[in-house]
Image (cartoon, rainbow, N blue to C red):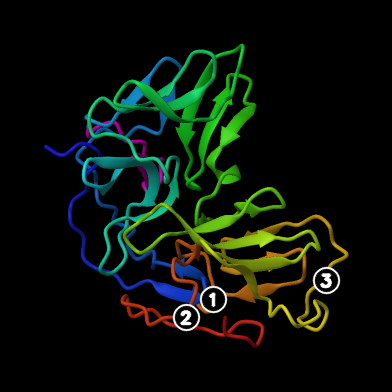
Amino acid sequence: MEPGCSAPNHPQVAPFNLRGKALHAISPRNSWRVMWVLKVSRLDTIREGKSLSIEKSEDVLIPANGVFSACFYSVGDNAYCYAIWFNKPSRGKNQTIIWMANRDQPVNGRSSKLSLLKNGNLLLTDAGRFTVWATNTQSLSSVHLSLYNTGNLVVQNMEGVTLWESFDFPTDTLLPQQLLTRSTRLVSSRSQTNYSSGFYKLYFDNDNILRLLHDGLEVSSVYWPEPGVVSWQAGRFTYNSSRIAVLDTFGNFSSSDNFTFMEAEYGLELQRRLNMDYDGCNAPNPDGLKNYYFNGFMF
């Protein structure tokens, strides 16, 4: 039996897409109120001193609303990452990954585990020997690890203080109410099947402007907004130094530099994500997703 988590097959449902060159917001329809049930015990929290093993398919965290799962995910031959994904698959895909702890250093399919230590540190060990990822948190009081309904994986102590949360360390995806800040960025995957860090980045620069960057092996260059256009001509403001952007639950994206867009499929009855695409261009989409204009431009 393969290690990691498995899920039953689902009927394919076409999501909707709001794409920029490398940036697109995806909203799978929430017509799936009748949730599929994993053939495992539902667990959204583990306590200190406990571990989640790659070899136990029942070691999966699922929040109360059943929208997300957190478990070991296969990314290659005997290569696994600890990941969070939407339980409802997109057309032509398996689960849609929204976060990975160790995207650039997969672990072995045997004896690897995610452990919450009594000192408050959450760490991922490869084959039970090497630590490949850790939160480096400490606590004098008891701690627990929980997967929230929002898709946020959180380490808290018994006083309710958040010691660490996945929302502060995004990979290529932003979820509703998750902030993109001066200290965070979205980094694309290497390809559609290679989840390691790629070459396209969404981030705030030192001028407080939200930008898209191609950071290749030999060449690095900003390509959005157009480098030759003055920020105010592009409708961007540099005087707001808060450097915060957020996608809300209705599908409205807003940034402190005055960049905004609203998804065509507006409303609460959707599960959304803002994703940094792997190819950095508005290429034909194999899922048959729709392209939309926002703020008068198509990115």
On the question of residue 92 being in view, the answer is yes
Report helix, strand or loop for mark 3. loop
Residue 26 picture quarter: bottom left
| Residue 169 appears left or right of 39 | right
| Residue 14 appears left or right of 162 | left
- Residue 207 inside the magenta-drawn segment: no
Q: What residue sits right under mark 3 in the picture?
A: 237
Are the residues at dot 2 and dot 1 in contact (C-beta closer than 8 Å)?
Answer: yes
- Residue 59 inside the magenta-drawn segment: yes
- Mark 3, Cα crowd under 10 Å, few <14 / some 14-19 / many 20+, is some
Q: What residue sits right under mark 1 in the picture?
A: 20
Q: Which residues are magenta?
A: 57-72
Q: Quadrant of the C terminus?
A: bottom right
Q: Earlier in the sequence, mark 3 or mark 2?
A: 3
Q: Earlier in the sequence, mark 3 or mark 1?
A: 1
The residue positioned 32% from the left and 57% from the top of the image is 88
Q: What residue sits right under mark 2 in the picture?
A: 282
Residue 140, labelled with which disc? none
Percent x, y for residue 13?
Answer: 29, 70
Identify which residue, 6 or 237, lies in the foreground: 237
Amino acid type of disc 2?
Answer: Asn
Report helix, strand or loop for mark 2. loop
Amino acid type of disc 1?
Answer: Gly
Amino acid type of disc 3?
Answer: Phe
Report helix, strand or loop for mark 1. loop
